[in-house]
Every structure is written in structure tokens, then in C-alpha cells.
Amino acid sequence: MSLFLNSFYFLALILASPWLAWRFCRKGRSFNNFRTRFTGNVQSLRASSNQKTVWFHGVSVGEIHLLRQVVSTIQTSKPDWFVVVSSSTDNGLLEAQKCFKGIPVVLFPLDFSWAIHKAISQIKPDLIVLAESELWPNFLHCCKAKDIPVSVINGRMSPRTQARYLNFPWVAKSFFSKISAFALQNIETEKFLHRIGVSPISTRVTGSIKFDGVTFSRNDPNIEKFKSMFGIKPNELVWVAGSTQAPEEQYLLNAYIVLKKEFPLLRLILVPRQPDLFNQVRKQIELTGLPFKNRSDLGPAVAPDDSIILVDTLGELRFVWGLADIAFVGGSMDGKRGGQNMIEPAAYGSAVFFGDKIWNFKQVAQQLIQAGGASMISSPTILESTARTLLANESLRIQMGRNAKDFVISQQGATSKTILMLEDFLCQDFRNLAA
């Protein structure tokens, strides 16, 4: 099995080498990081002999943010556990290094058997915890062979993903049977796992951890810092559009040009999801002829009055949401991403709206809409009209924000349930129970 997968991966690597070389040279991707992932040499990590080692993994920035709450709780409740955090991407690694001071942060190995064996031999985990996704066959096979339990937390599967697995149910069963336990966001995902043969004793519906890690107060010093840096005045209306994907930025700019004439105090803050998009969005803003400022150019300097702000930095959206009177959550109109996390702006009490292509956040979106805390749109025209309605009607805007915040509060508690499941592994020999 490993030989076949290694050969397949190696062939794919050869075919992708021109693209990889382009990313290394043109987009500043680190070859050293790639080499570390290819070899699995994640440095020497040592826990004392009486400590349990827990390896937490988050694919990229979003999953790393999700792990903050879990790791922080673990460190408080189980100070004798030795924690290691990994990520698969350059941006995820940088964010993890910022979020987890004093904790070893490493790169996750590529799914070559030698890289996995090397990384595991250096980390020596008693338990591996994967945030949401990124399940690799060689990695799971190796963990199973070494009797290292693997848990998936905050797990979910979109209907599209479920349909793909159902095309090959025997493969899916073999794949998921190597995972000892699942802490899941919703009962639909649990039912799917049971349907393909995963034991009910291995699954628990714990809810979404993303509800627990949010900030509710707009008085956070980080939010005040951005308010001052962006030159936001008390009487201005702020529209934050976060985690956007093309062509959403163009839709937003078109709507802003029209609405700015009707609401002169309107400010727009654009936060593209991927760094690769920063230059493209910058050019789009330049073409409008409107004043704008890059977040990366600000610091001691303050943005000029009335300028559009392009947040061309990473890891700051969670605070920028705290400036929003109205909040558009991106990745929801392009038809490729399947939506982005709308919980953070909802927690601040912003009036939230998003597109109708949100299959990755379908349940949360539906619940938020039912609670009167969000609106769903289906076209650029409705994007503009929805923003106009919210900007013009203060009482509606405020009530939507209250409803959104109340909904987030009502959904909290997943972290404690997840911690209890992890404690079962290391404190009650849960691995035998789940075998």
C-alpha cells in the first residue's frame, strides 16, 4: 500500500514540479519548508518521560485559529501534557508560531511513508488530533500500525464530500476505520459515518468549536488599534468584506461606488482570503480611481480620510470584523469555496450577509438566518440592495446584530465536550474502547 502511494505521489510531484518551481520563485513559497515536509525532519522534540505528548494539526490559518481555544484549555486543565502543533502551509506555520508561543510548532510531513515515519519518531505522540480535515492514507496507516490513536475534532463533511465517498463505500470504510474517534459538528456527518460502517462508539456530536473561540467585545485593544489605524470616525458606517474570493471583490467595489453616493459616510474594508489575491485586488481598486490604502503600509501612519482599506496581511480579520456595522462573508458567491466562517462577525453583533453557495457552512448559515441574524443573497444586484437596506435602516441593522450575537452565545460549549473526549484517550485508555 505504502509503496503504491509513494510511487503515485512521486509521479504527481514530478508532473507538478514546474508549477512548484513557479510558486517558489514567483510567489515566495519556501523551498526549505517543502524540503522539511518531504523529509519529515521536524527537529528534535522532547517531552519528559512522564508526560503525554499530544500532536495537534491544523491545515492552514483557519484551522490554526480553531485550535487556539482547544490548546489553551488543554494547557490550563492538563499542564502535564506536552503539546506540539503542526500546519501544512507556509501561512499556517507563521500563524501558528504567532498563536502558540512557547509551544513547538512544526510543519506537517507530506504523505510519503519515510517522511511520516521520521516525523512520528521525532515527535513520539501518544495522541494525534486533526482539526476538521486533511486525512492522508499513508499517515493514517502508519499511525494505525504504531497503535497511535488519531482523533478528528470539529469534524464535518459537506454533502458534496459525502457523495464522493459514497461512490466508493468500501474505500471510505477502510479509510475512516483508522481514525479512533470523531468529535463532530453536526448529526448529519455522524449519520454519514455510521452509514459507511464507522462504529457509533467512535463518534460524538460536540458542536462547532468555532463558536467558543470568538470575541464578543468591540472594546478589544486590537480592534481599537485598527479603528485608529484605518482612520474610522464615530459617525462613519463601516462595511467589512472578509475572506473574499474572485469575482466577489469586483462585485463589492461596484456596489460600493453606487452606495458611497447615497451614504457619504460609508467606509469599505476589503480582506481577500488568499495572499495570492492581494496584488490582483489592489489593481482592481486602483482602476476605480477611489482613494485606498494597504494595511501593510500602515502602522504609525494612519489611513487618509474616506479611503478604502485593503487588508493585505494575515491573521487580522478576526479583529477587523469588530469594526463592521455590516459584514459580507466571502467565498460564498464564487461557487468554488463553499463559504467561509460567518461566526466571528456574528459574535460582534454585525449585520451579516453572504452568498448562497455556502455548502461548507450550510447548517450554521441556516441557523443564523432562522435566528434573524443574517441574510443570504444570490446575485451582485441583491448584494447591493441588501447592503443599501441595512445601511439605511439602523434599527434593522442593530436588531440583526443582536440576533446574530445571541445565536452565537447559545451555541457555545463544544470545546469542553471535545476536551472530555481527548481526556478519554489519554486518561481512560479510550483507544482500546474504540478499537
Image (spheres, rainbow, N blue to C red):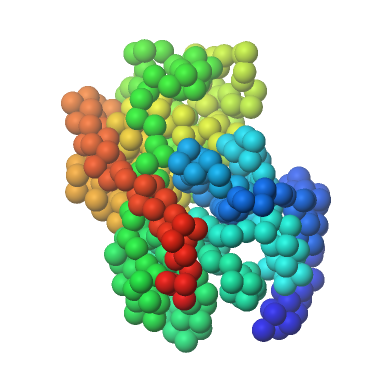
Q: Residue furthest front?
A: 50
23 shown above or below 240: below
The answer to whether any part of residue 391 appears in the image is yes
Name the spot of residue 252 as percent of width and height, x first: 43, 38
User: Between 281 and 206, which is closer to the camera in this rendering?
Assistant: 206
Q: Residue at x 19, y 31 (%)?
A: 399
Where in the figure is residue 70, as x and y percent of width and height? Answer: 46, 45
Counting the numbered discs, the total is 0
| Residue found at x 52% / y 49% | 63
Q: Is residue 411 left or right of residue 336?
A: left
Which residue does the image show at 27% across and 38% down from the upper left? 409
Task: Identify which residue is drawn at 73% across, 57% down.
Answer: 122
Q: Is residue 223 left or right of residue 403?
A: right
Name the quadrant containing residue 182.
Answer: bottom left
Viewer-proximal residue, 149 or 66?
A: 149
Spot occupied by residue 13 in the image (x, y as percentages of width and height): 76, 69
